[in-house]
Image (spheres, grey):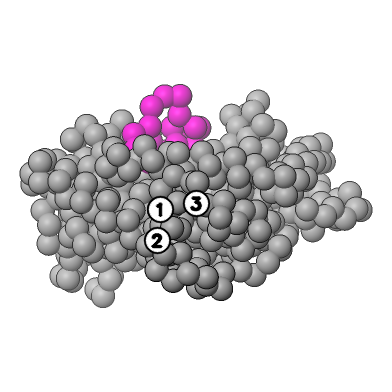
Amino acid sequence: MGMAETDLPSSPPGRLLGPVVSLPGPHAGYATQPAASRGRFHPETESATRTCYSRDRDRIIHSSAFRRLKHKTQVFVQHEGDYYRTRLTHSLEVAQLARSLARTLGADEDLAETVALAHDLGHTPFGHAGEEALDAATREIGGFDHNAHALRIVTKLEHRYAAFDGLNLTWETLEGLVKHNGPLLPPLPGPIEGFDRRWPLELESWPGLEAQLAALADDIAYVSHDIDDGLRAGLFTVTDLLDWPVVGAHVKGVLDRHGDLELSRFIGELIRTLMSELMEDVLARTRANLGAGAFASAAALRGAGRATAEFSPALLERLQGLKTFQMEKMYRHPHVMKSMNRAKGVVFSLYEAFVADPGLLPPDWAAAAREAVSGTVARDYIAGMTDRFALAEYSRIFHAEIAL
């Protein structure tokens, strides 16, 4: 992992070099076509055996930041149990759903999978609590945004190649990473604004279909699998779920069909039918939008001025109700909040310590901190930590153990 931010090269971004790779690809005209990619910031000869988006996917999987997701919180602090999801397992589940959606709709599967695998790279330790704490601690230097930090990781902080910093991903992957949830409007996070000046990502428009599908896959994965984790953790019961929007009907269906089941079998049946409804809704609504738009190219789809991949309005309303229930019954559950409040204290304390004494940082980071705006290197260092490494650093600096 790298250190302080420096300007990217001022030379214009390069296009793909070498022969066009003739590999099987998407058939739909509105799909993002690898052969028409806008290329990479640093020109490279492309692979003879992989499309450019397949190569992007492989670079993400082999990155240090991706491996660290194994020990980063999704909802439950990573050490609480082997069955709960981490950022890594969540990202893999999102990638599977995104690829399935893309395959069914004739979009580029590799690009959809790549954006899905990259979408959580910028998250801090301790889930959203860690991000909130780091954002608050760094407010005077621009705060913290996980999408912006993910862009910094793949364009600057990963040090795997001799010729450039970052992973040198294609324009389409970077676009999808930054705006998979939709257009970005000012004020922009600093890393996104700075990179966009050097290589415009057309932030005001919607991304390609593949990134839109990755965002929906993220929604489907977390609303479904967080129910799985919450049941296993005992935060609520099967009976409690009968009153929840969307999921309640599926709970009743499983009980009517199978009666009493052991918890693991019940969860498997519930999540399978719930995810099927959500996936089928996205496919039906998106097919209708694609038909109405009659997009002849990915560029035309991007220029539509609205989302093409989406839930139906009726399901989206019910889904918002489900998310409200999950917020009340799960994410704000006293057990979860107790751990997360302590985790916030760890992040605040680490940041204050590193800013007050950069010598506490590893030597290369400490050297970078002496040349950078105060706090920026500490912010990057903490953002890259896993849960367990953050706790170890807290113990090293403050000579105290903290139980989450």
Kind of element beneath mark 2: helix
Drawn side of residue 297 relative to residue 215, left or right:
left
Relative to 139, does residue 345 appear above or below in the rendering?
Answer: below
Label 2 sits on what residue type? Gly
How packed mark 2 is, by other alpha carbons closer than 10 Å (few <14, some 14-19, many 20 or more), is: some
Q: Count residues near mark 3 (Cα–Cα under 10 Å), then give few for <14, some for 14-19, many for 20+.
A: some
Secondary structure under tag 1 reads: helix
Left or right, residue 153 beside residue 209: right
Residue at the (40%, 53%) spot, across then down: 249
The three-letter code of the residue at mark 1 reads: Ala
- What separation in Å lies between label 3 and label 1 (alpha carbons)? 7 Å
Magenta part of the chain: 181-196
The residue that label 1 is drawn on is 249
Q: Nearer the viewer, residue 226 or 329?
A: 329
Query: Which dot marks residue 242?
Result: 3
Estimate the x, y position of residue 322 in percent, counting from the top left: 46, 43
Place of residue 63 in the rendered image (x, y in percent of width and height, measured from the top left)? 50, 63
Could you give the CA–CA distance between mark 3 and mark 2, rounded to whole angstroms?
Answer: 10 Å
Tell me, yes or no, whether the two marked residues, 1 and 2, touch with CB atoms within 8 Å: yes
Q: Which residue carries the number 2 mark? A: 253
309 and 384: which one is in front?
A: 309
Residue 256 visible (yes or no): yes
Q: Which mark is residue 325?
A: none
Compare residues 284 and 348 and report the one nearer the observer: 284
Element carrying mark 3: loop
Q: Nearer the viewer, residue 213 or 22?
A: 213
Residue 94: quadrant of the picture: bottom left
Residue at x 34% of width, y 53% of height = 278
